[in-house]
Amino acid sequence: MRTKITELLHIDNPIIQGGMAWVAEHHLAAAVSAASGLGIIGAANAPADWVRGEIRKAREITSNPIGVNVMLLSPYADEVAQVLVEEKVPVITTGAGNPGKYMEMWKSAGSKVIPVVASVALARMMERGGADAVIAEGTESGGHIGAATTMTLVPQVRDAVKVPVIAAGGVGDGRGMAACFMLGADAVQIGTRFVVAKESICHENYKERIIKAKDIDSAVTGRSHGHPIRQLRNQMTKEYLKKEQEGVPFEELELMTVGALRNAVVDGDVKHGTVMAGQIAGLISKEQTCQEIIDEIMKEAAALLQGATNE
């Protein structure tokens, strides 16, 4: 399936793996890229040396393009930005801020820069700043979220910018991918389904929690202080939401979540840890390899899009 994104990024399938903190390391990124999607290493709050090491380890597994997601609020963002230039990373996605200060450096090094946006205004700003494409991420996604749904955000971003648009949030199978293409997307970014991939280093408890999730099992914490995060319901979210409703100060709420994502992903504490996952979790029912996931999604999407074209 050839699209503006497959041509821009030199990949065969218009599927990008989300740069999820603690999850998107070299094993997963390399497996997605080897399956002809675009694997992404999530830099999150990690130091630059760790990011460099992950890039090199991924390249030992596959020669296909691999990208890195930069969390711009990271205290190591400046150092990581420089490492990406030194390592000649072909694709850089960004979140939690404006990558403007790095744009010229990255573009001069030959990297394609693709920011995540949650609004039309931000998409336009990123295009003016030199972005090669944008990821329009709806509120259905796991982790930090905006307010607009994928269904409403993607077509409005498509109409607002000339650069390619990647749809994210609530995409877990070929039906979701086909729907995003009908809305004007040139590719999709998928996170939650890749969390349960066989190559994912996520603890089995985390994977099992997603596989057993129902459609109503996600909760959003942090709305009261402007930092909403979608995750699966557990004892921690129950206590957090109760305190949030009681008006507990932000600083106290933050203490509840320090290290909570790592506790869930690495240690398997799905009761008190942060189990980030999108609303699509209820659709995911099995663990597969990245190749199987991508092949299944592409086959289903192609059949649906071909049917729509024929009609």
Image (cartoon, rainbow, N blue to C red):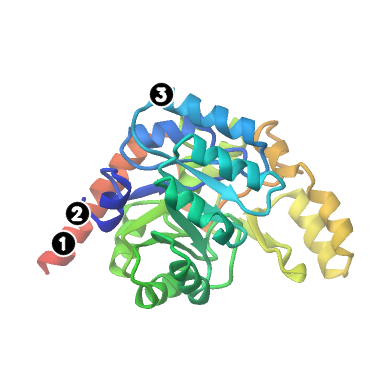
Label 1 near label 2: C-beta < 8 Å? Answer: yes
Q: Is residue 42 left or right of residue 130?
A: right
Q: Residue 303 — which label?
A: 2
Q: Dividing the picture into quarters, in which one does residue 264 lie?
A: top right
Question: In the image, residue 34 lies at what x, y percent?
Answer: 34, 32
Tell which circle, 2 or 3, labels the residue nearer the N-terminal end: 3
Residue 26 percent location from the top left of the image: 50, 31
Q: x, y (%) of residue 208?
A: 57, 37
Which residue is disc 1 drawn over? 307
3D distance between C-alphas at marks 2 and 3: 31 Å
Q: Can residue 280 be seen here?
A: no
Callout 3–callout 1 Cβ contact below 8 Å:
no
Q: Position of residue 102 (x, y in %)?
A: 55, 54
Q: Name the element at disc 1.
A: helix
- Left or right relative to 89: residue 242: right
| Kind of residue at badge 2 | Ala
For the residues labelled 2 and 1, the Cα–Cα distance comes to 6 Å
**Disc 2 secondary structure class:** helix
Q: Residues within 10 Å of mark 2 (few under 14, many from 20)?
A: some
Q: Nearer the viewer, residue 205 or 228?
A: 228
Mark 3 residue element: helix
Q: Residues within 10 Å of mark 3 (few under 14, many from 20)?
A: some
- Position of 118 with respect to 171 (left or right) is right
